Amino acid sequence: MSRVVVCGSLNMDVVVQSARLPEAGETLLGAEVSFLPGGKGLNQAIASARLGSPTAMVGAVGNDSFANSLRGFLADNDVDSSGVREIDGAVTGVALIQVADGDNSITVASGANMHFRAEMLRHAPRRDEVWVAQFETPLAATGEILARARKAGARTVLNLAPYTRHPARLLKSVDIAVLNEIELGHAADMNLTSASSQRSLVAACESLRQRGARAVIATLGSKGALVVSANGVEVIPAFKAKVVDTTGAGDCFVGALAARLALGAFPAEAARYASAAASCAVERLGAAPSMPTARQVAARLAKA
């Protein structure tokens, strides 16, 4: 089995639950708070590892108690954290997540994540690996690492979230680009919403393929996902779920996708599995702690 290597952010998520999200300038009482491991990179690594794929995490933390908690959480989930570097003088990233009625809003203080550099890698990419990256660490590092991975013959996955303008050459190092409809609209310079037609979504995906991505997967929440590649367009249906918290659903999708790619799956096959995994994740509170096991995903697939 190939190894999944996730390069990205590690945060401590401060999750505040309330009956509704506050209005601007409003204070709500009676909320509950939890401190949970998170960050897009860590979430994706946990998702991959819980599904049985050998997984390594590469990133940066500060020298503080949050960093110790995150390292411990990675170890408890069998994720190799030897590539997580400690940055002197920086604090570990923190995300404030407000959750109400299954929806959320997120504000991130990146901290040590923005100090990560490609030079911090402890090992070079290998041909038998799947390398995953997002946009919560410096673009220069992301671009350099993906280019190295592609040159080594590894498969590369880029989650263009949170969306950031990037050099045009970046997608030339990407096998599979993953993004939701809002991020897709930004990337393709199109006005896309949850109500956009499939034709518009496919056209946007094709524009990213023309810039270098081999395949593009648009995640569409309750509408499932679209996979656009040289093999054409494939629609991936959503799986029914009792939604508790959507935080980390997209990260679960990416981590599960990478885990299946590591087993040799084609993009559409991997995307269907990832969609099932994400439907399991939204039924629990939090991001990383909600990532499902392979047995849970298999049960969800069996019910479809």
Image: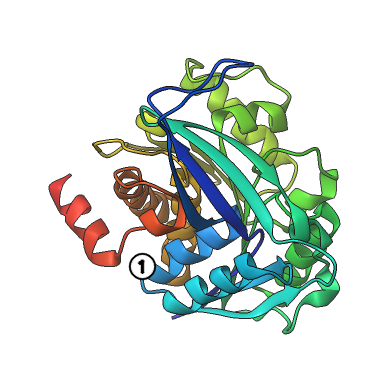
Percent position of residue 10, x then y: 63, 61
The crowding category of the residue bearing disc 1, from other C-alpha atoms within 10 Å (few below 14, some 14 to 19, many at least 20), is: many
Looking at the rendered image, the quarter that the C terminus falls into is top left
- Residue at the spot 36% in from the left edge and 67% down from the top edge: 51
- Residue at the spot 74% in from the left edge and 49% down from the top edge: 171
- Indicate whether 28 appears above or below 170: above
Residue under label 1, please give it: 51
Visible in this render: residue 290?
Answer: yes
Could you say whether the residue bearing mark 1 is in a helix, strand or loop?
Answer: loop
- Residue at the spot 73% in from the left edge and 82% down from the top edge: 124
Using the rendered view, name the quadrant where residue 9 is placed.
bottom right
Toward the viewer: 234 or 91? 91
Percent position of residue 92, x then y: 70, 61
Toward the viewer: 303 or 18? 18
Looking at the rendered image, the quarter that the N terminus falls into is bottom left
The image's colouring method is: rainbow
Q: Residue furthest front?
A: 29
- Say how many tags the image has: 1
Percent position of residue 194, x then y: 49, 20
Toward the viewer: 113 or 235? 113
- Indicate whether 138 appears above or below 19: below
Q: Residue furthest left?
A: 303
Is 188 displayed left or right of 182 in the figure?
Answer: right
Toward the viewer: 37 or 251? 37
Percent position of residue 290, x then y: 37, 54
Visible in this render: residue 220?
Answer: no
Is 71 displayed left or right of 29 in the figure?
Answer: right
- Indicate whether 57 appears above or below 241: below
Q: Amino acid at mark 1?
A: Leu
